[in-house]
Image: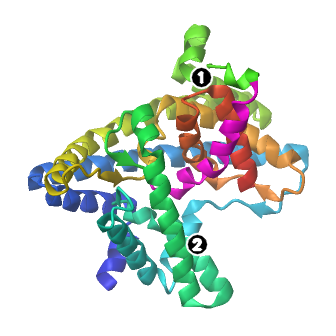
Amino acid sequence: MNGFQFFINCGATVMLPVIITIVGLIFGLKITQAFKSGLTLGIGFAGIKLVLDFMTTNVGPAAKAMVERTHVHLNALDVGWGSIAAVTWASPIIAILIFVILLINIVLLVLKLTHTLDVDIWNYHHMAIVGIMVYFVTHNVFLGVGATAVTAIFTFKLSDWSQPIVEKFFGMPGVSLPTISALSSLVIAVPMNWLLDKIPFFKNSKFTIKDAQKYLGFFGDSMIMGLIIGLAIGGLAGYDLQKVLQLGVSMSAVLVLIPKMTAMFMEGLMPISSAAQKWSQNKFKGRKLFIGLDAAVVVGNPDVITTALIIIPLTIAMAIFLLGNRVLPFADLAVVPFRVALVVVLTNGNLLKNIVIGLVVTASLL
């Protein structure tokens, strides 16, 4: 148990290379190939995390400054997913919950009730926290385990359902995204997308990030868009010229660096994905098998990250004016790309829909 806890405490950047290496060996890769794939994925993940932390460091204080300028009293500070993860992994029942999630995944695979093999063990905490909250409220282990079990089943089924559109939009064959921070948005996005399709203005709109780049020319370049968005956030925060310029360049860097980190993720993923498909074809004739990965693999998509950077300042403004809201958005502003990733997929990159649905999603979080 101490060894398992040590492994968990190392965090996702260590866990991911180890798990992917083991998975690669199971699927028949040579140890050198499996290790290199795992390490490349780990480096890509570390890079994405560094860039998202960099974004939080820059946007977070701007969010506070914007709220302070309005003199609005928001007394609940968003402390971010890191705090939730810490609470989860420190829980007295975490070992039971991790085992239950893994067991449910295996049983569902054997019974052909899911096609997703979730190797993203670090993000099991998304499913485990539901059971932990139930346990803290009820002091009943069985209710806590039951809550996590139900969450896991819904997560794997929703991963299967969304996999075809994820594969088509991002060009990632054999990959699903069982990350609740991304998947949960579909609960709102699916009915909203259906509703917006009943409105001619939205139904007939085909405006995407690529269209914006085409029509805006020089200003549609991702680094220039990042610069403009950063300058706008800095201006709204009341920063002096020096800080406004610094924030502009920082946001420009985010839009340029995240896709590069994602490319590393994809480089490490492809050998594993190909091996998994061959293995499943040999072992389970005609059976589909998806590798469940962290949604971090898709947040570097230009549609996703640009949509997120548009929604972030709008969410901060919404926090000020949303009736009854007490939450000051802060640490989890960096998670907005995860929240909108599958919204972007569902709308096939329709920018107007992405913004409307994305704001309803972030409003529900507030």
Towards the viewer: 232 or 166? 166
User: With 317 as the anchor, is 272 left or right in this view?
Assistant: left
Q: Where residue 230 appears, x then y in whole percent?
A: 65, 31
Q: Which of 357 and 226 is in front in this view?
A: 357
Q: Examine the structure image and report whether residue 216 is included in the region drawn in magenta.
A: no
Q: Which residue is drawn at 29% across and 67% down?
A: 110
Q: What element carries label 1?
A: helix
Quadrant of the rendered image containing residue 298: top left
**Residue type at numbered disc 1:** Met
- Chief SS of the magenta region: helix
Residue 12 pos. (x, y %): 38, 60
Residue ID for mark 2: 130
Q: Is residue 198 magenta?
A: yes
Residue at x-position 32% and y-position 72%: 7
Mark 2: secondary structure = helix
| Mark 1, residue position | 225
Question: The magenta stretch spans which residues?
Answer: 178-199
